[in-house]
Structure formats: C-alpha cells, structure tokens
Image (spheres, rainbow, N blue to C red):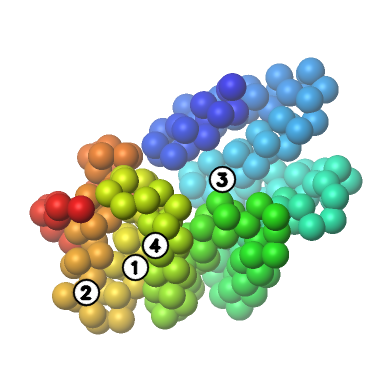
Amino acid sequence: MLNNLARVLLELHRLPEAAGYAERAYADARQAGDEIVVNQALSVRFNIYLEQRQRERAAAVLAELEPRWKRMMPAGHIAFALTHLYEALLAAGRGERQTAVAEADQAVSMAEASSQAGYYVRLFLLRRAEIGLDVGRPDLARADAERLIALERKAIGPGALASTLGRGYLLQGRALLAQGKVAEAQGALALALAHLQPTLGKDHPLTRLARQLGGSAIPRL
C-alpha cells in the first residue's frame, strides 16, 4: 500500500512525498522478506529519482534491480523490457542519443511480444515519445504519440478522460511544434489540456506546460 501510494504521488508530481513512501515500502518489504514488493519499490524509486533528475541514484537503483529481475523472473517477462526502457531513459539523460533510441526500440519490441502487451505497449510508447523529443527526433516522437493516442482512446472508450491520453496529446503537440506545424499543434495541445487539467490538476507541471504552449482554451471532448 505504501508503494501504491508512492505511485499515485509520483503521477501527481509530489516527488518528495513519493520518494518517502517508496523508500519506506522498500525498507518494510526487505524486513518482511517480500521480494516482489522489493522489486516494485525499486522500480518506483527509479522513476521518482529520474523525475527528480537524480540520475546517479536512479542508475544505482537499476543496478540493484536488474540482477534481481534476472534471478526471479521467467524468460519473456515484461520486467526485461522495462530494463531496456530504464536504460534508454538514463542514456537520454546523458545525451547518448543512439543508445537511448536503440534501447527504447528494444523495449517497445519486447513489450509488443509480451502477454502483458496492452498496458505496457502504451506506457512504452509514451516514454519512447519523450525520449524522441529529448534526443531531437520529433518525427519519432510524433509517430509514437499518435499511436499511443489511438490505442488509449480505444482502451478507455469515447468521452472518457485519462491522464495518459492527455500526455499523448501533449507529446503530439510538442512534436508538431518542433516540426513547425503550429496550427495542428494548437489543436493537440488544447486536447492535452482538456485531459490533463481534470485528471492531474491545474497546477501539475504537465498541465501548466500544455496551457503555456497551447493557450488556456479547453475544447469540448
């Protein structure tokens, strides 16, 4: 429960609180001998530290987590795709563009082949789109964002609000802006705001970014 709370706080960008709960979850799971929750807490901590730009701490967590996954998980488990994704995120932060793209591609390919493909493919497309923007490849980012949007809309149904869909529209809008397609970008960014504000809150960094880049008007969905 501590770890699940940390996940929610991470999504809401309440990072110091998220880190505190994830670290407590890790310590408690170690004491209880719950190896699965240890792994889950390490994964959450990796993402929190990365969001806090504490890349060395994130890398140290991954160095602890990766051999645990190799020891505990069966071949083909989604954890191995996550390893490639996490390596891609670290490489992007170091400015290692080719490594970041290659690792992200491997992560998406493995997720597509997994029995857990549904949720994880959407997650990995989102993160690969972020990496595409980080490494100066808006073409890659746009393609992944548009695929994510299509998959997410199919998954949640018409008229539903979702932060993941808002993130997809935001990534699409940012990629379109980088390509000089301002009018198309404004439409995507308005849709991003329409999803992000009611799900993550008006003061979330992503909501503020969508508002800043696309204006304050929220369209009818």
Number of the label disc, if any, that sits on residue 184: 2
Residue carrying label 1: 172
For the residue labelled by badge 4, is the local secondary structure a helix, a strand or a loop?
Answer: helix
- Label 4 or label 1, whichever comes before in sequence order: 4
Could you tell me how far apart the alpha carbons at marks 3 and 4 are, in whole angstroms?
A: 22 Å
Q: Nearer the viewer, mark 3 or mark 4?
A: 4
> Hey, what amino acid is under mark 2?
Glu
Could you tell me how far apart the alpha carbons at marks 1 and 3 are, in whole angstroms?
A: 22 Å
- Label 3 or label 2, whichever comes before in sequence order: 3
> Hey, what amino acid is under mark 3?
Asn
Q: Nearer the viewer, mark 3 or mark 2?
A: 2
Residue carrying label 3: 47
- Label 2 or label 1, whichever comes before in sequence order: 1
Q: Residue at x 71, y 30 (%)?
A: 37
Locate residue 55, reporting x and y percent.
58, 51
Locate residue 159, reporting x and y percent.
27, 49
Could you tell me how far apart the alpha carbons at marks 4 and 2 are, in whole angstroms?
A: 15 Å
